[in-house]
Amino acid sequence: MLQSSHVVGHLTSKIGIHVVQSCAMSILGTSIATKIPLMTSGGLDSLGISEFANMLSQASGREFRAADLFDHPTIESVYNFFVDEAGLLAFPED
C-alpha cells in the first residue's frame, strides 16, 4: 500500500484529484474511474473504507471520516468534499 508521503507532494488543485485517485488505487489495487461508486462498483469493503478515509485525512491534513464516504461515494465527489466542505483548493505541500 502507498503511504500518503508517496501520494502527496507539491500539488495544485488541477491535479489534486489525482491524490484521491492514488489513495483509492493503492487500496483497491487497480484504477477506477472518477465517477464510479467506490463501495458498490469499485469493491471497497469496510476495512478499505477505513484505510481510504485515514489515508485521505493524513494526506490532506483535514478529517475525512469513513462515514463521509457514504455521502461522497466517488473519487470525484470525495475531491469535491475537500474543495467545497473542507475549504481546500488543493492538498497541502508535504
Image (spheres, rainbow, N blue to C red):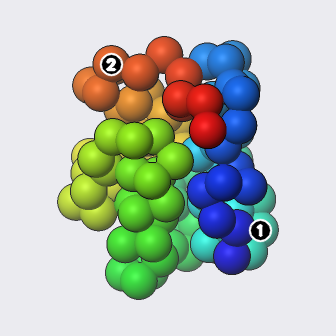
Can you tell which quarter of the image residue 87 is in?
A: top left
Residue at disc 2, secondary structure: loop
Q: Mark 2 points at which residue?
A: 87
Q: Of discs 1 and 2, which sits in the foreground? A: 2
> Residue type at mark 2?
Gly
Q: What distance separates the C-alpha of mark 1 from that of mark 2? A: 29 Å
Indicate left or right for 65 with 81 as reference.
left
Image height check: is 59 above or below 27?
above
Name the quadrant of the N terminus.
bottom right
Q: Is residue 62 left or right of residue 11?
A: left
Marks 2 and 1: in contact by CB < 8 Å? no
Q: Residue at x 60, y 30 (%)?
A: 93
Decide which of 81, 8 is in the foreground and name it. Answer: 8
Residue at the image point whose x is 61% and y is 38% from the top: 94
- Which residue does the numbered mark 1 point to in the structure image? 30
60 in relation to 57, above or below:
above
Is 52 situated above or below 90?
below
The amino acid type, in three-letter code, at marker 1 is Thr
Residue 41, given in percent of the width and then of the height, sits at 55, 65
Write the residue at 53% across / 29% down. 92
Residue 85 horizontal/vertical position (percent): 27, 25
Q: Does residue 34 appear in the picture of this structure?
A: no
- Say which of 73 and 11 sits in front: 11
Dot 1 alpha-carbon crowd within 10 angstroms: few under 14, some 14 to 19, many 20 or more: few
